Image (spheres, rainbow, N blue to C red):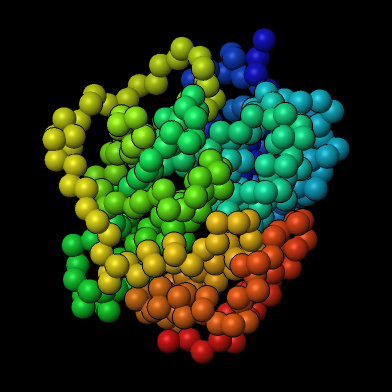
Amino acid sequence: MKKKIAILGSTGSIGKKTLDILRNDKKNFDIFLLTANKNTSLLIKQIKEFNPKNIIITDDKNYKIVKKKFKNKNVYDSLNKINSIFKSKIDYTMSSISGFNGLKPTLEIIKFTKTIAIANKESIICGWNLINKQLKKHKTNFIPIDSEHFSIWSLIKNSPHEGIDKIIITASGGPFLKKSYKQLKKINPIDAIKHPNWKMGKKISIDSATLMNKIFEVIEAKKIFNIKFNKFKILIHPQSYIHAIIKFKNGLIKIIAHDTDMKIPIFNSLYNNENKTIHSKDINLKILNNLKLQEVDAKKFPVIKLLNKIPNNESLFETLLVTMNDELVDLFLTKQVSFQNISKNLIKFLNLNIFAKYKRQKPNNLAQIVKLNNFVRLKTKTLSIL
């Protein structure tokens, strides 16, 4: 019997890679739902190739184009229609809508899927307690897709967490790893988005260059695996071949390595516990013999200090952190803030008394998170920026 699949964000990077895998195994998968925003041309190609039963396209103009072109299909204009599309549980959902827009549909689709793979940082960082509540309520399996979290998940899923001594997440160091602190003063957006190992969007590429993406990944890992921050460590690993290292209290150290290709964690989430083969490169002995693991330079990457400021309890502080960083990255991309001042402003603003209360407040619902996100976006624009 074919597995029924939904992809939230099918025209994005993760969505496209998921469909690349399914393309080679159409006989075993049935695409039940594809969603997109504005990339009409690609979505139309996906519809013609994969013949999904349901389509959601949220941009009004593009919705009308797709609706007119595919009169024989169920085409909807809003992610709010998820509740009316599903009548029973499908087998697998890939949740890969970027940004805060991915949280609401992720929460809504959990009850309609046996397994959900989540590749949306904001959903996990800001709304994990809400997601986890839905996962438990509807007995839905969860698989993290970020390469670091998938690696940790793979290493510890059959091990008791109390046996874990240390979890190391690796960071490439971004495009400026070999530059001096002084040289970072003249960085421009064009250079900052050129990640040395991964092809990513502008926002996440900037976060990689500042190391902010690794701060987010530690927060995600802490929430997903319910392990305190003091057990995590970030090491620089320029080749991005090792994704996670776990030291157990029994003396064993386990490492996961794979090529810099997101198809590998996606493939393994689709075929979880199945004996399937993905075509990948041979083991790279040159890299394994020269891992170049390094401590993080706190002067060059000052955001590393933020790990000491994030509470272990579930709080709205994480939403504050994500939103404020988003705004500062946008200011850098429009050349209103220098590269170094992304981190300096972020640390400065998070220390303001006006935001201290959010460390004590737990996110109880989606509306609360959305309200704070909107408030912080507006408030950041009024603060004294370096």
Identify the image quadrant of the N terminus: top right
Q: Is residue 236 left or right of residue 157?
A: left
Q: Looking at this view, is 156 or 128 the one in front? A: 156
Tell me where residue 226 appears, x and y as whole percent: 55, 44
Q: Residue at x 51, y 89 (%)?
A: 384
Image: 136 above or below 295:
above
Tell me where residue 4 appears, x and y as whole percent: 68, 23
Q: Looking at this view, is 328 or 292 the one in front? A: 292
Q: Is residue 229 left or right of residue 126?
A: left
Q: Looking at this view, is 116 or 230 the one in front? A: 230
Residue 372's image quarter? bottom right
Residue 365's image quarter? bottom right
Q: Residue at x 14, y 40 (%)?
A: 290
Q: Residue at x 19, y 67 (%)?
A: 179
Whether residue 122 is visible to the viewer of this picture, yes or no, is no
Q: Residue at x 48, y 67 (%)?
A: 309
Image: 91 above or below 27:
below
Residue reaching furthest to the top: 1
Whether residue 191 is visible to the viewer of this picture, yes or no, is yes
Tell how many labels: 0
Image: 274 above or below 190:
above
Tell me where residue 162 appears, x and y as whole percent: 48, 36
Identify the image quadrant of the C terminus: bottom left
Residue reaching furthest to the bottom: 384
Image: 305 above or below 87:
below
Residue 182's image quarter? bottom left
Tell me where residue 135 appears, x and y as whole percent: 70, 36
